[in-house]
Image: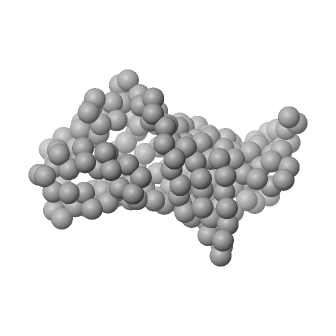
Amino acid sequence: MKKYKLDTDRSKILWTGKNKKMTINGEVEFEKGNFFVELDGKLVGKLKIDLKSIKLASNDDINENQEKDFLNHLASEDFFNVDEYPFAEYEIKEITEKDAEHTIFGILKMKEKAFGLNTTGKIDIEKNGIVAESSFKLSDVNKAITDKITQKYDGEPIESIHLKTYVKADISKEKSLNN
């Protein structure tokens, strides 16, 4: 088995939230993560997401006060509640490949709850590391989250929350692990 350690400086989650009035872009950082390539070639892993690191990219659709309000809302008890739950975890259970596209089957754990979260993208396992890019629409996964944003922002329904994840993992010092 080979172990790969997430390069937190080069990996991030980029997100875009859209409704009829605005588009908001931002990013979230990873706290840590590891991937394992088992002897049969199966890739599994765990990623820890730092919810306190949520920030907005430059956004023309909102002003500075709206930006502060939006970030406070995401951190608040009625949304991510980052004071009590500063991290989320994503566990990769299985990856399949069809026509050069990968489907990543996993479990997302947030606020003491867990739900299945599958993404699509591209994964390259190289000699010294793993490079992956995947994306999904949060509105397809958990409508309750998008409903909370809708309640807060002018009653305009959220059309989608799209997340794009870039992951770079380098092989750790332990090149091979025995079970």
Which residue occupies 28% across, 29% down? 77
Quadrant position of residue 104: bottom right
- In the image, residue 141 lies at what x, y percent? 41, 52
Residue placed most toward the observer, 43 or 6: 43
Considering the image in quadrants, where does the C terminus appear? top right
Horizontal side of residue 128 vs 57, given as left or right: right
173 in relation to 118, above or below: above
Quadrant in the rendering for residue 97: bottom right
Residue drawn at (27%, 62%) of the image:
159
The residue lying furthest to the top in this view is: 84
- Please determine whether, in this image, residue 142 is positioned above or below residue 16: above
Instruction: Give percent across and percent down for residue 123.
Output: 65, 62
> In the displayed structure, would residue 81 be above or below residue 40?
above
The answer to whether residue 56 of the structure is visible from this angle is: no
Quick one: which residue is furthest to the left in this view? 154
Pinpoint residue 67: horizontal percent, then vertical percent: 21, 46
Placement of the N terminus among the 4 image quadrants: top right
Does residue 125 appear left or right of residue 58 in this picture? right
The answer to whether residue 106 is seen in the rendering is yes
Camera-nearest residue between 92 and 51: 92
- Percent x, y of residue 8: 57, 43
Q: Could you tell me which residue is drawn at 53 percent across and 58 percent down?
A: 119
Residue at image point 13% right, 52% down: 155
